[in-house]
Image (tube, grey):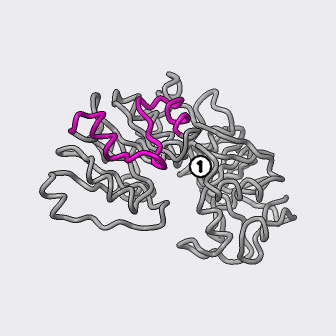
Amino acid sequence: MKAWLVSELGDPQDVLKWTDVPDVQPGSGQVKVKVEAAALNFPDILLCQGKYQITPTLPFTPGVEVSGEVVEVGEGVSTIKVGDKVFGGPQSASGAGGGYAEYALMSAADILTAPPGMPAEEAAGYLLTYQTSWVALHTRGQIKAGDVVLVHAGAGGVGSSAIQIAKAAGATVIATAGGPAKKQVCLDLGADHAIDYNSEDFATVVKEITNGRGADIVYDPVGGDVFDKSTKCIAFEGRILIIGFTSGRMAESKTNHVLVKNYSVVGVHWGYYRKMRPEVIPEADKALAKLYAEGKIKPHISKIYSFAELPEALVALGSRKTTGKVVVVP
């Protein structure tokens, strides 16, 4: 089989090579999947550069999100059968994922079956974004109809899913994005209001929209200055959901300010639920599948590249000029 292999660390366009690699065989509890689509994520870039929190053993194949068809099942697998369409995170001995390949290994206990009618390219970028946003808004944020939700980086992968899930819950959604084009993406996704953070002060605009009350929930995958400014427009008993730190700076919360304004700063580590509360994941999957069937959510795929264009696609992702999810297909 063939795969994109990293034999030395560096920028993706310099170190990724499409080459022959040993075929993968499913072990106990695993399934072998023919990859039909793979989603791009910033960790894939960092893995190539050697800047991620884990350092895989060289050589390795990145790719942490795929969808495809099960072609072989390992010992002890009874919940998944050959021919099933599945999605989730692949497994590899290196720890880098291994999804940018013709075939990938996946844990039968961790993967999910794609909702009926969902194309492979949508399924590839569905798990991390929508599960994260569901757990953030419902499990951690306790969202309810009528809430005002401020979604930062609304045109991005998790942001675009958060807009849709918040709207489906009956919230008023205010989204921030960089530039008129991304602002329009947020509106097209269903946001009631969109703010261009390059030219507008989002804290001021949020207060104007809410008549000074502020947002009940802030969905923040950016951190840094965005978190700092979000504390200026959070409502009484509001919740700031910490999704990530794409700005590169982890902000520090002033606990006296948290006390005086009576709001909460809430961590959202979706991956930890697999260990601590695994029942939450199938619950979220069932709820999301229902929303998908009802047409209330739909993964925003901004561009589909061929597998041969993977290095180019990762460069585009790293430039932050893309919106939603970017995927590659064979």
* Whole-percent x, y for residue 162 in the image: 44, 40
Q: Is residue 190 magenta?
A: yes
The answer, for residue 30, to whether it is visible in the render is: no
Give the amino acid at mark 1: Gly
Few, some or many residues within 10 Å of mark 1 (<14, 14–19, 20+): many
* Secondary element at image label 1: strand
Compared with residue 148, is residue 267 higher up or lower down, i.e. above or below?
below
Q: Which residues are magenta?
A: 183-212
- In the rendered image, which quarter is residue 115 located in? top right
Residue beneath the point at 17% across and 44% down: 236
- Which residue matches tag 1? 88
Tell me: 293 left or right of 100: left
Q: Is 18 in front, or is 243?
A: 243
Residue beneath the point at 55% across and 44% down: 179
Q: Is residue 238 magenta?
A: no
Residue found farthest to the left: 260
Q: Is 156 in front, or is 285?
A: 156
Q: Is 306 in front, or is 257?
A: 257
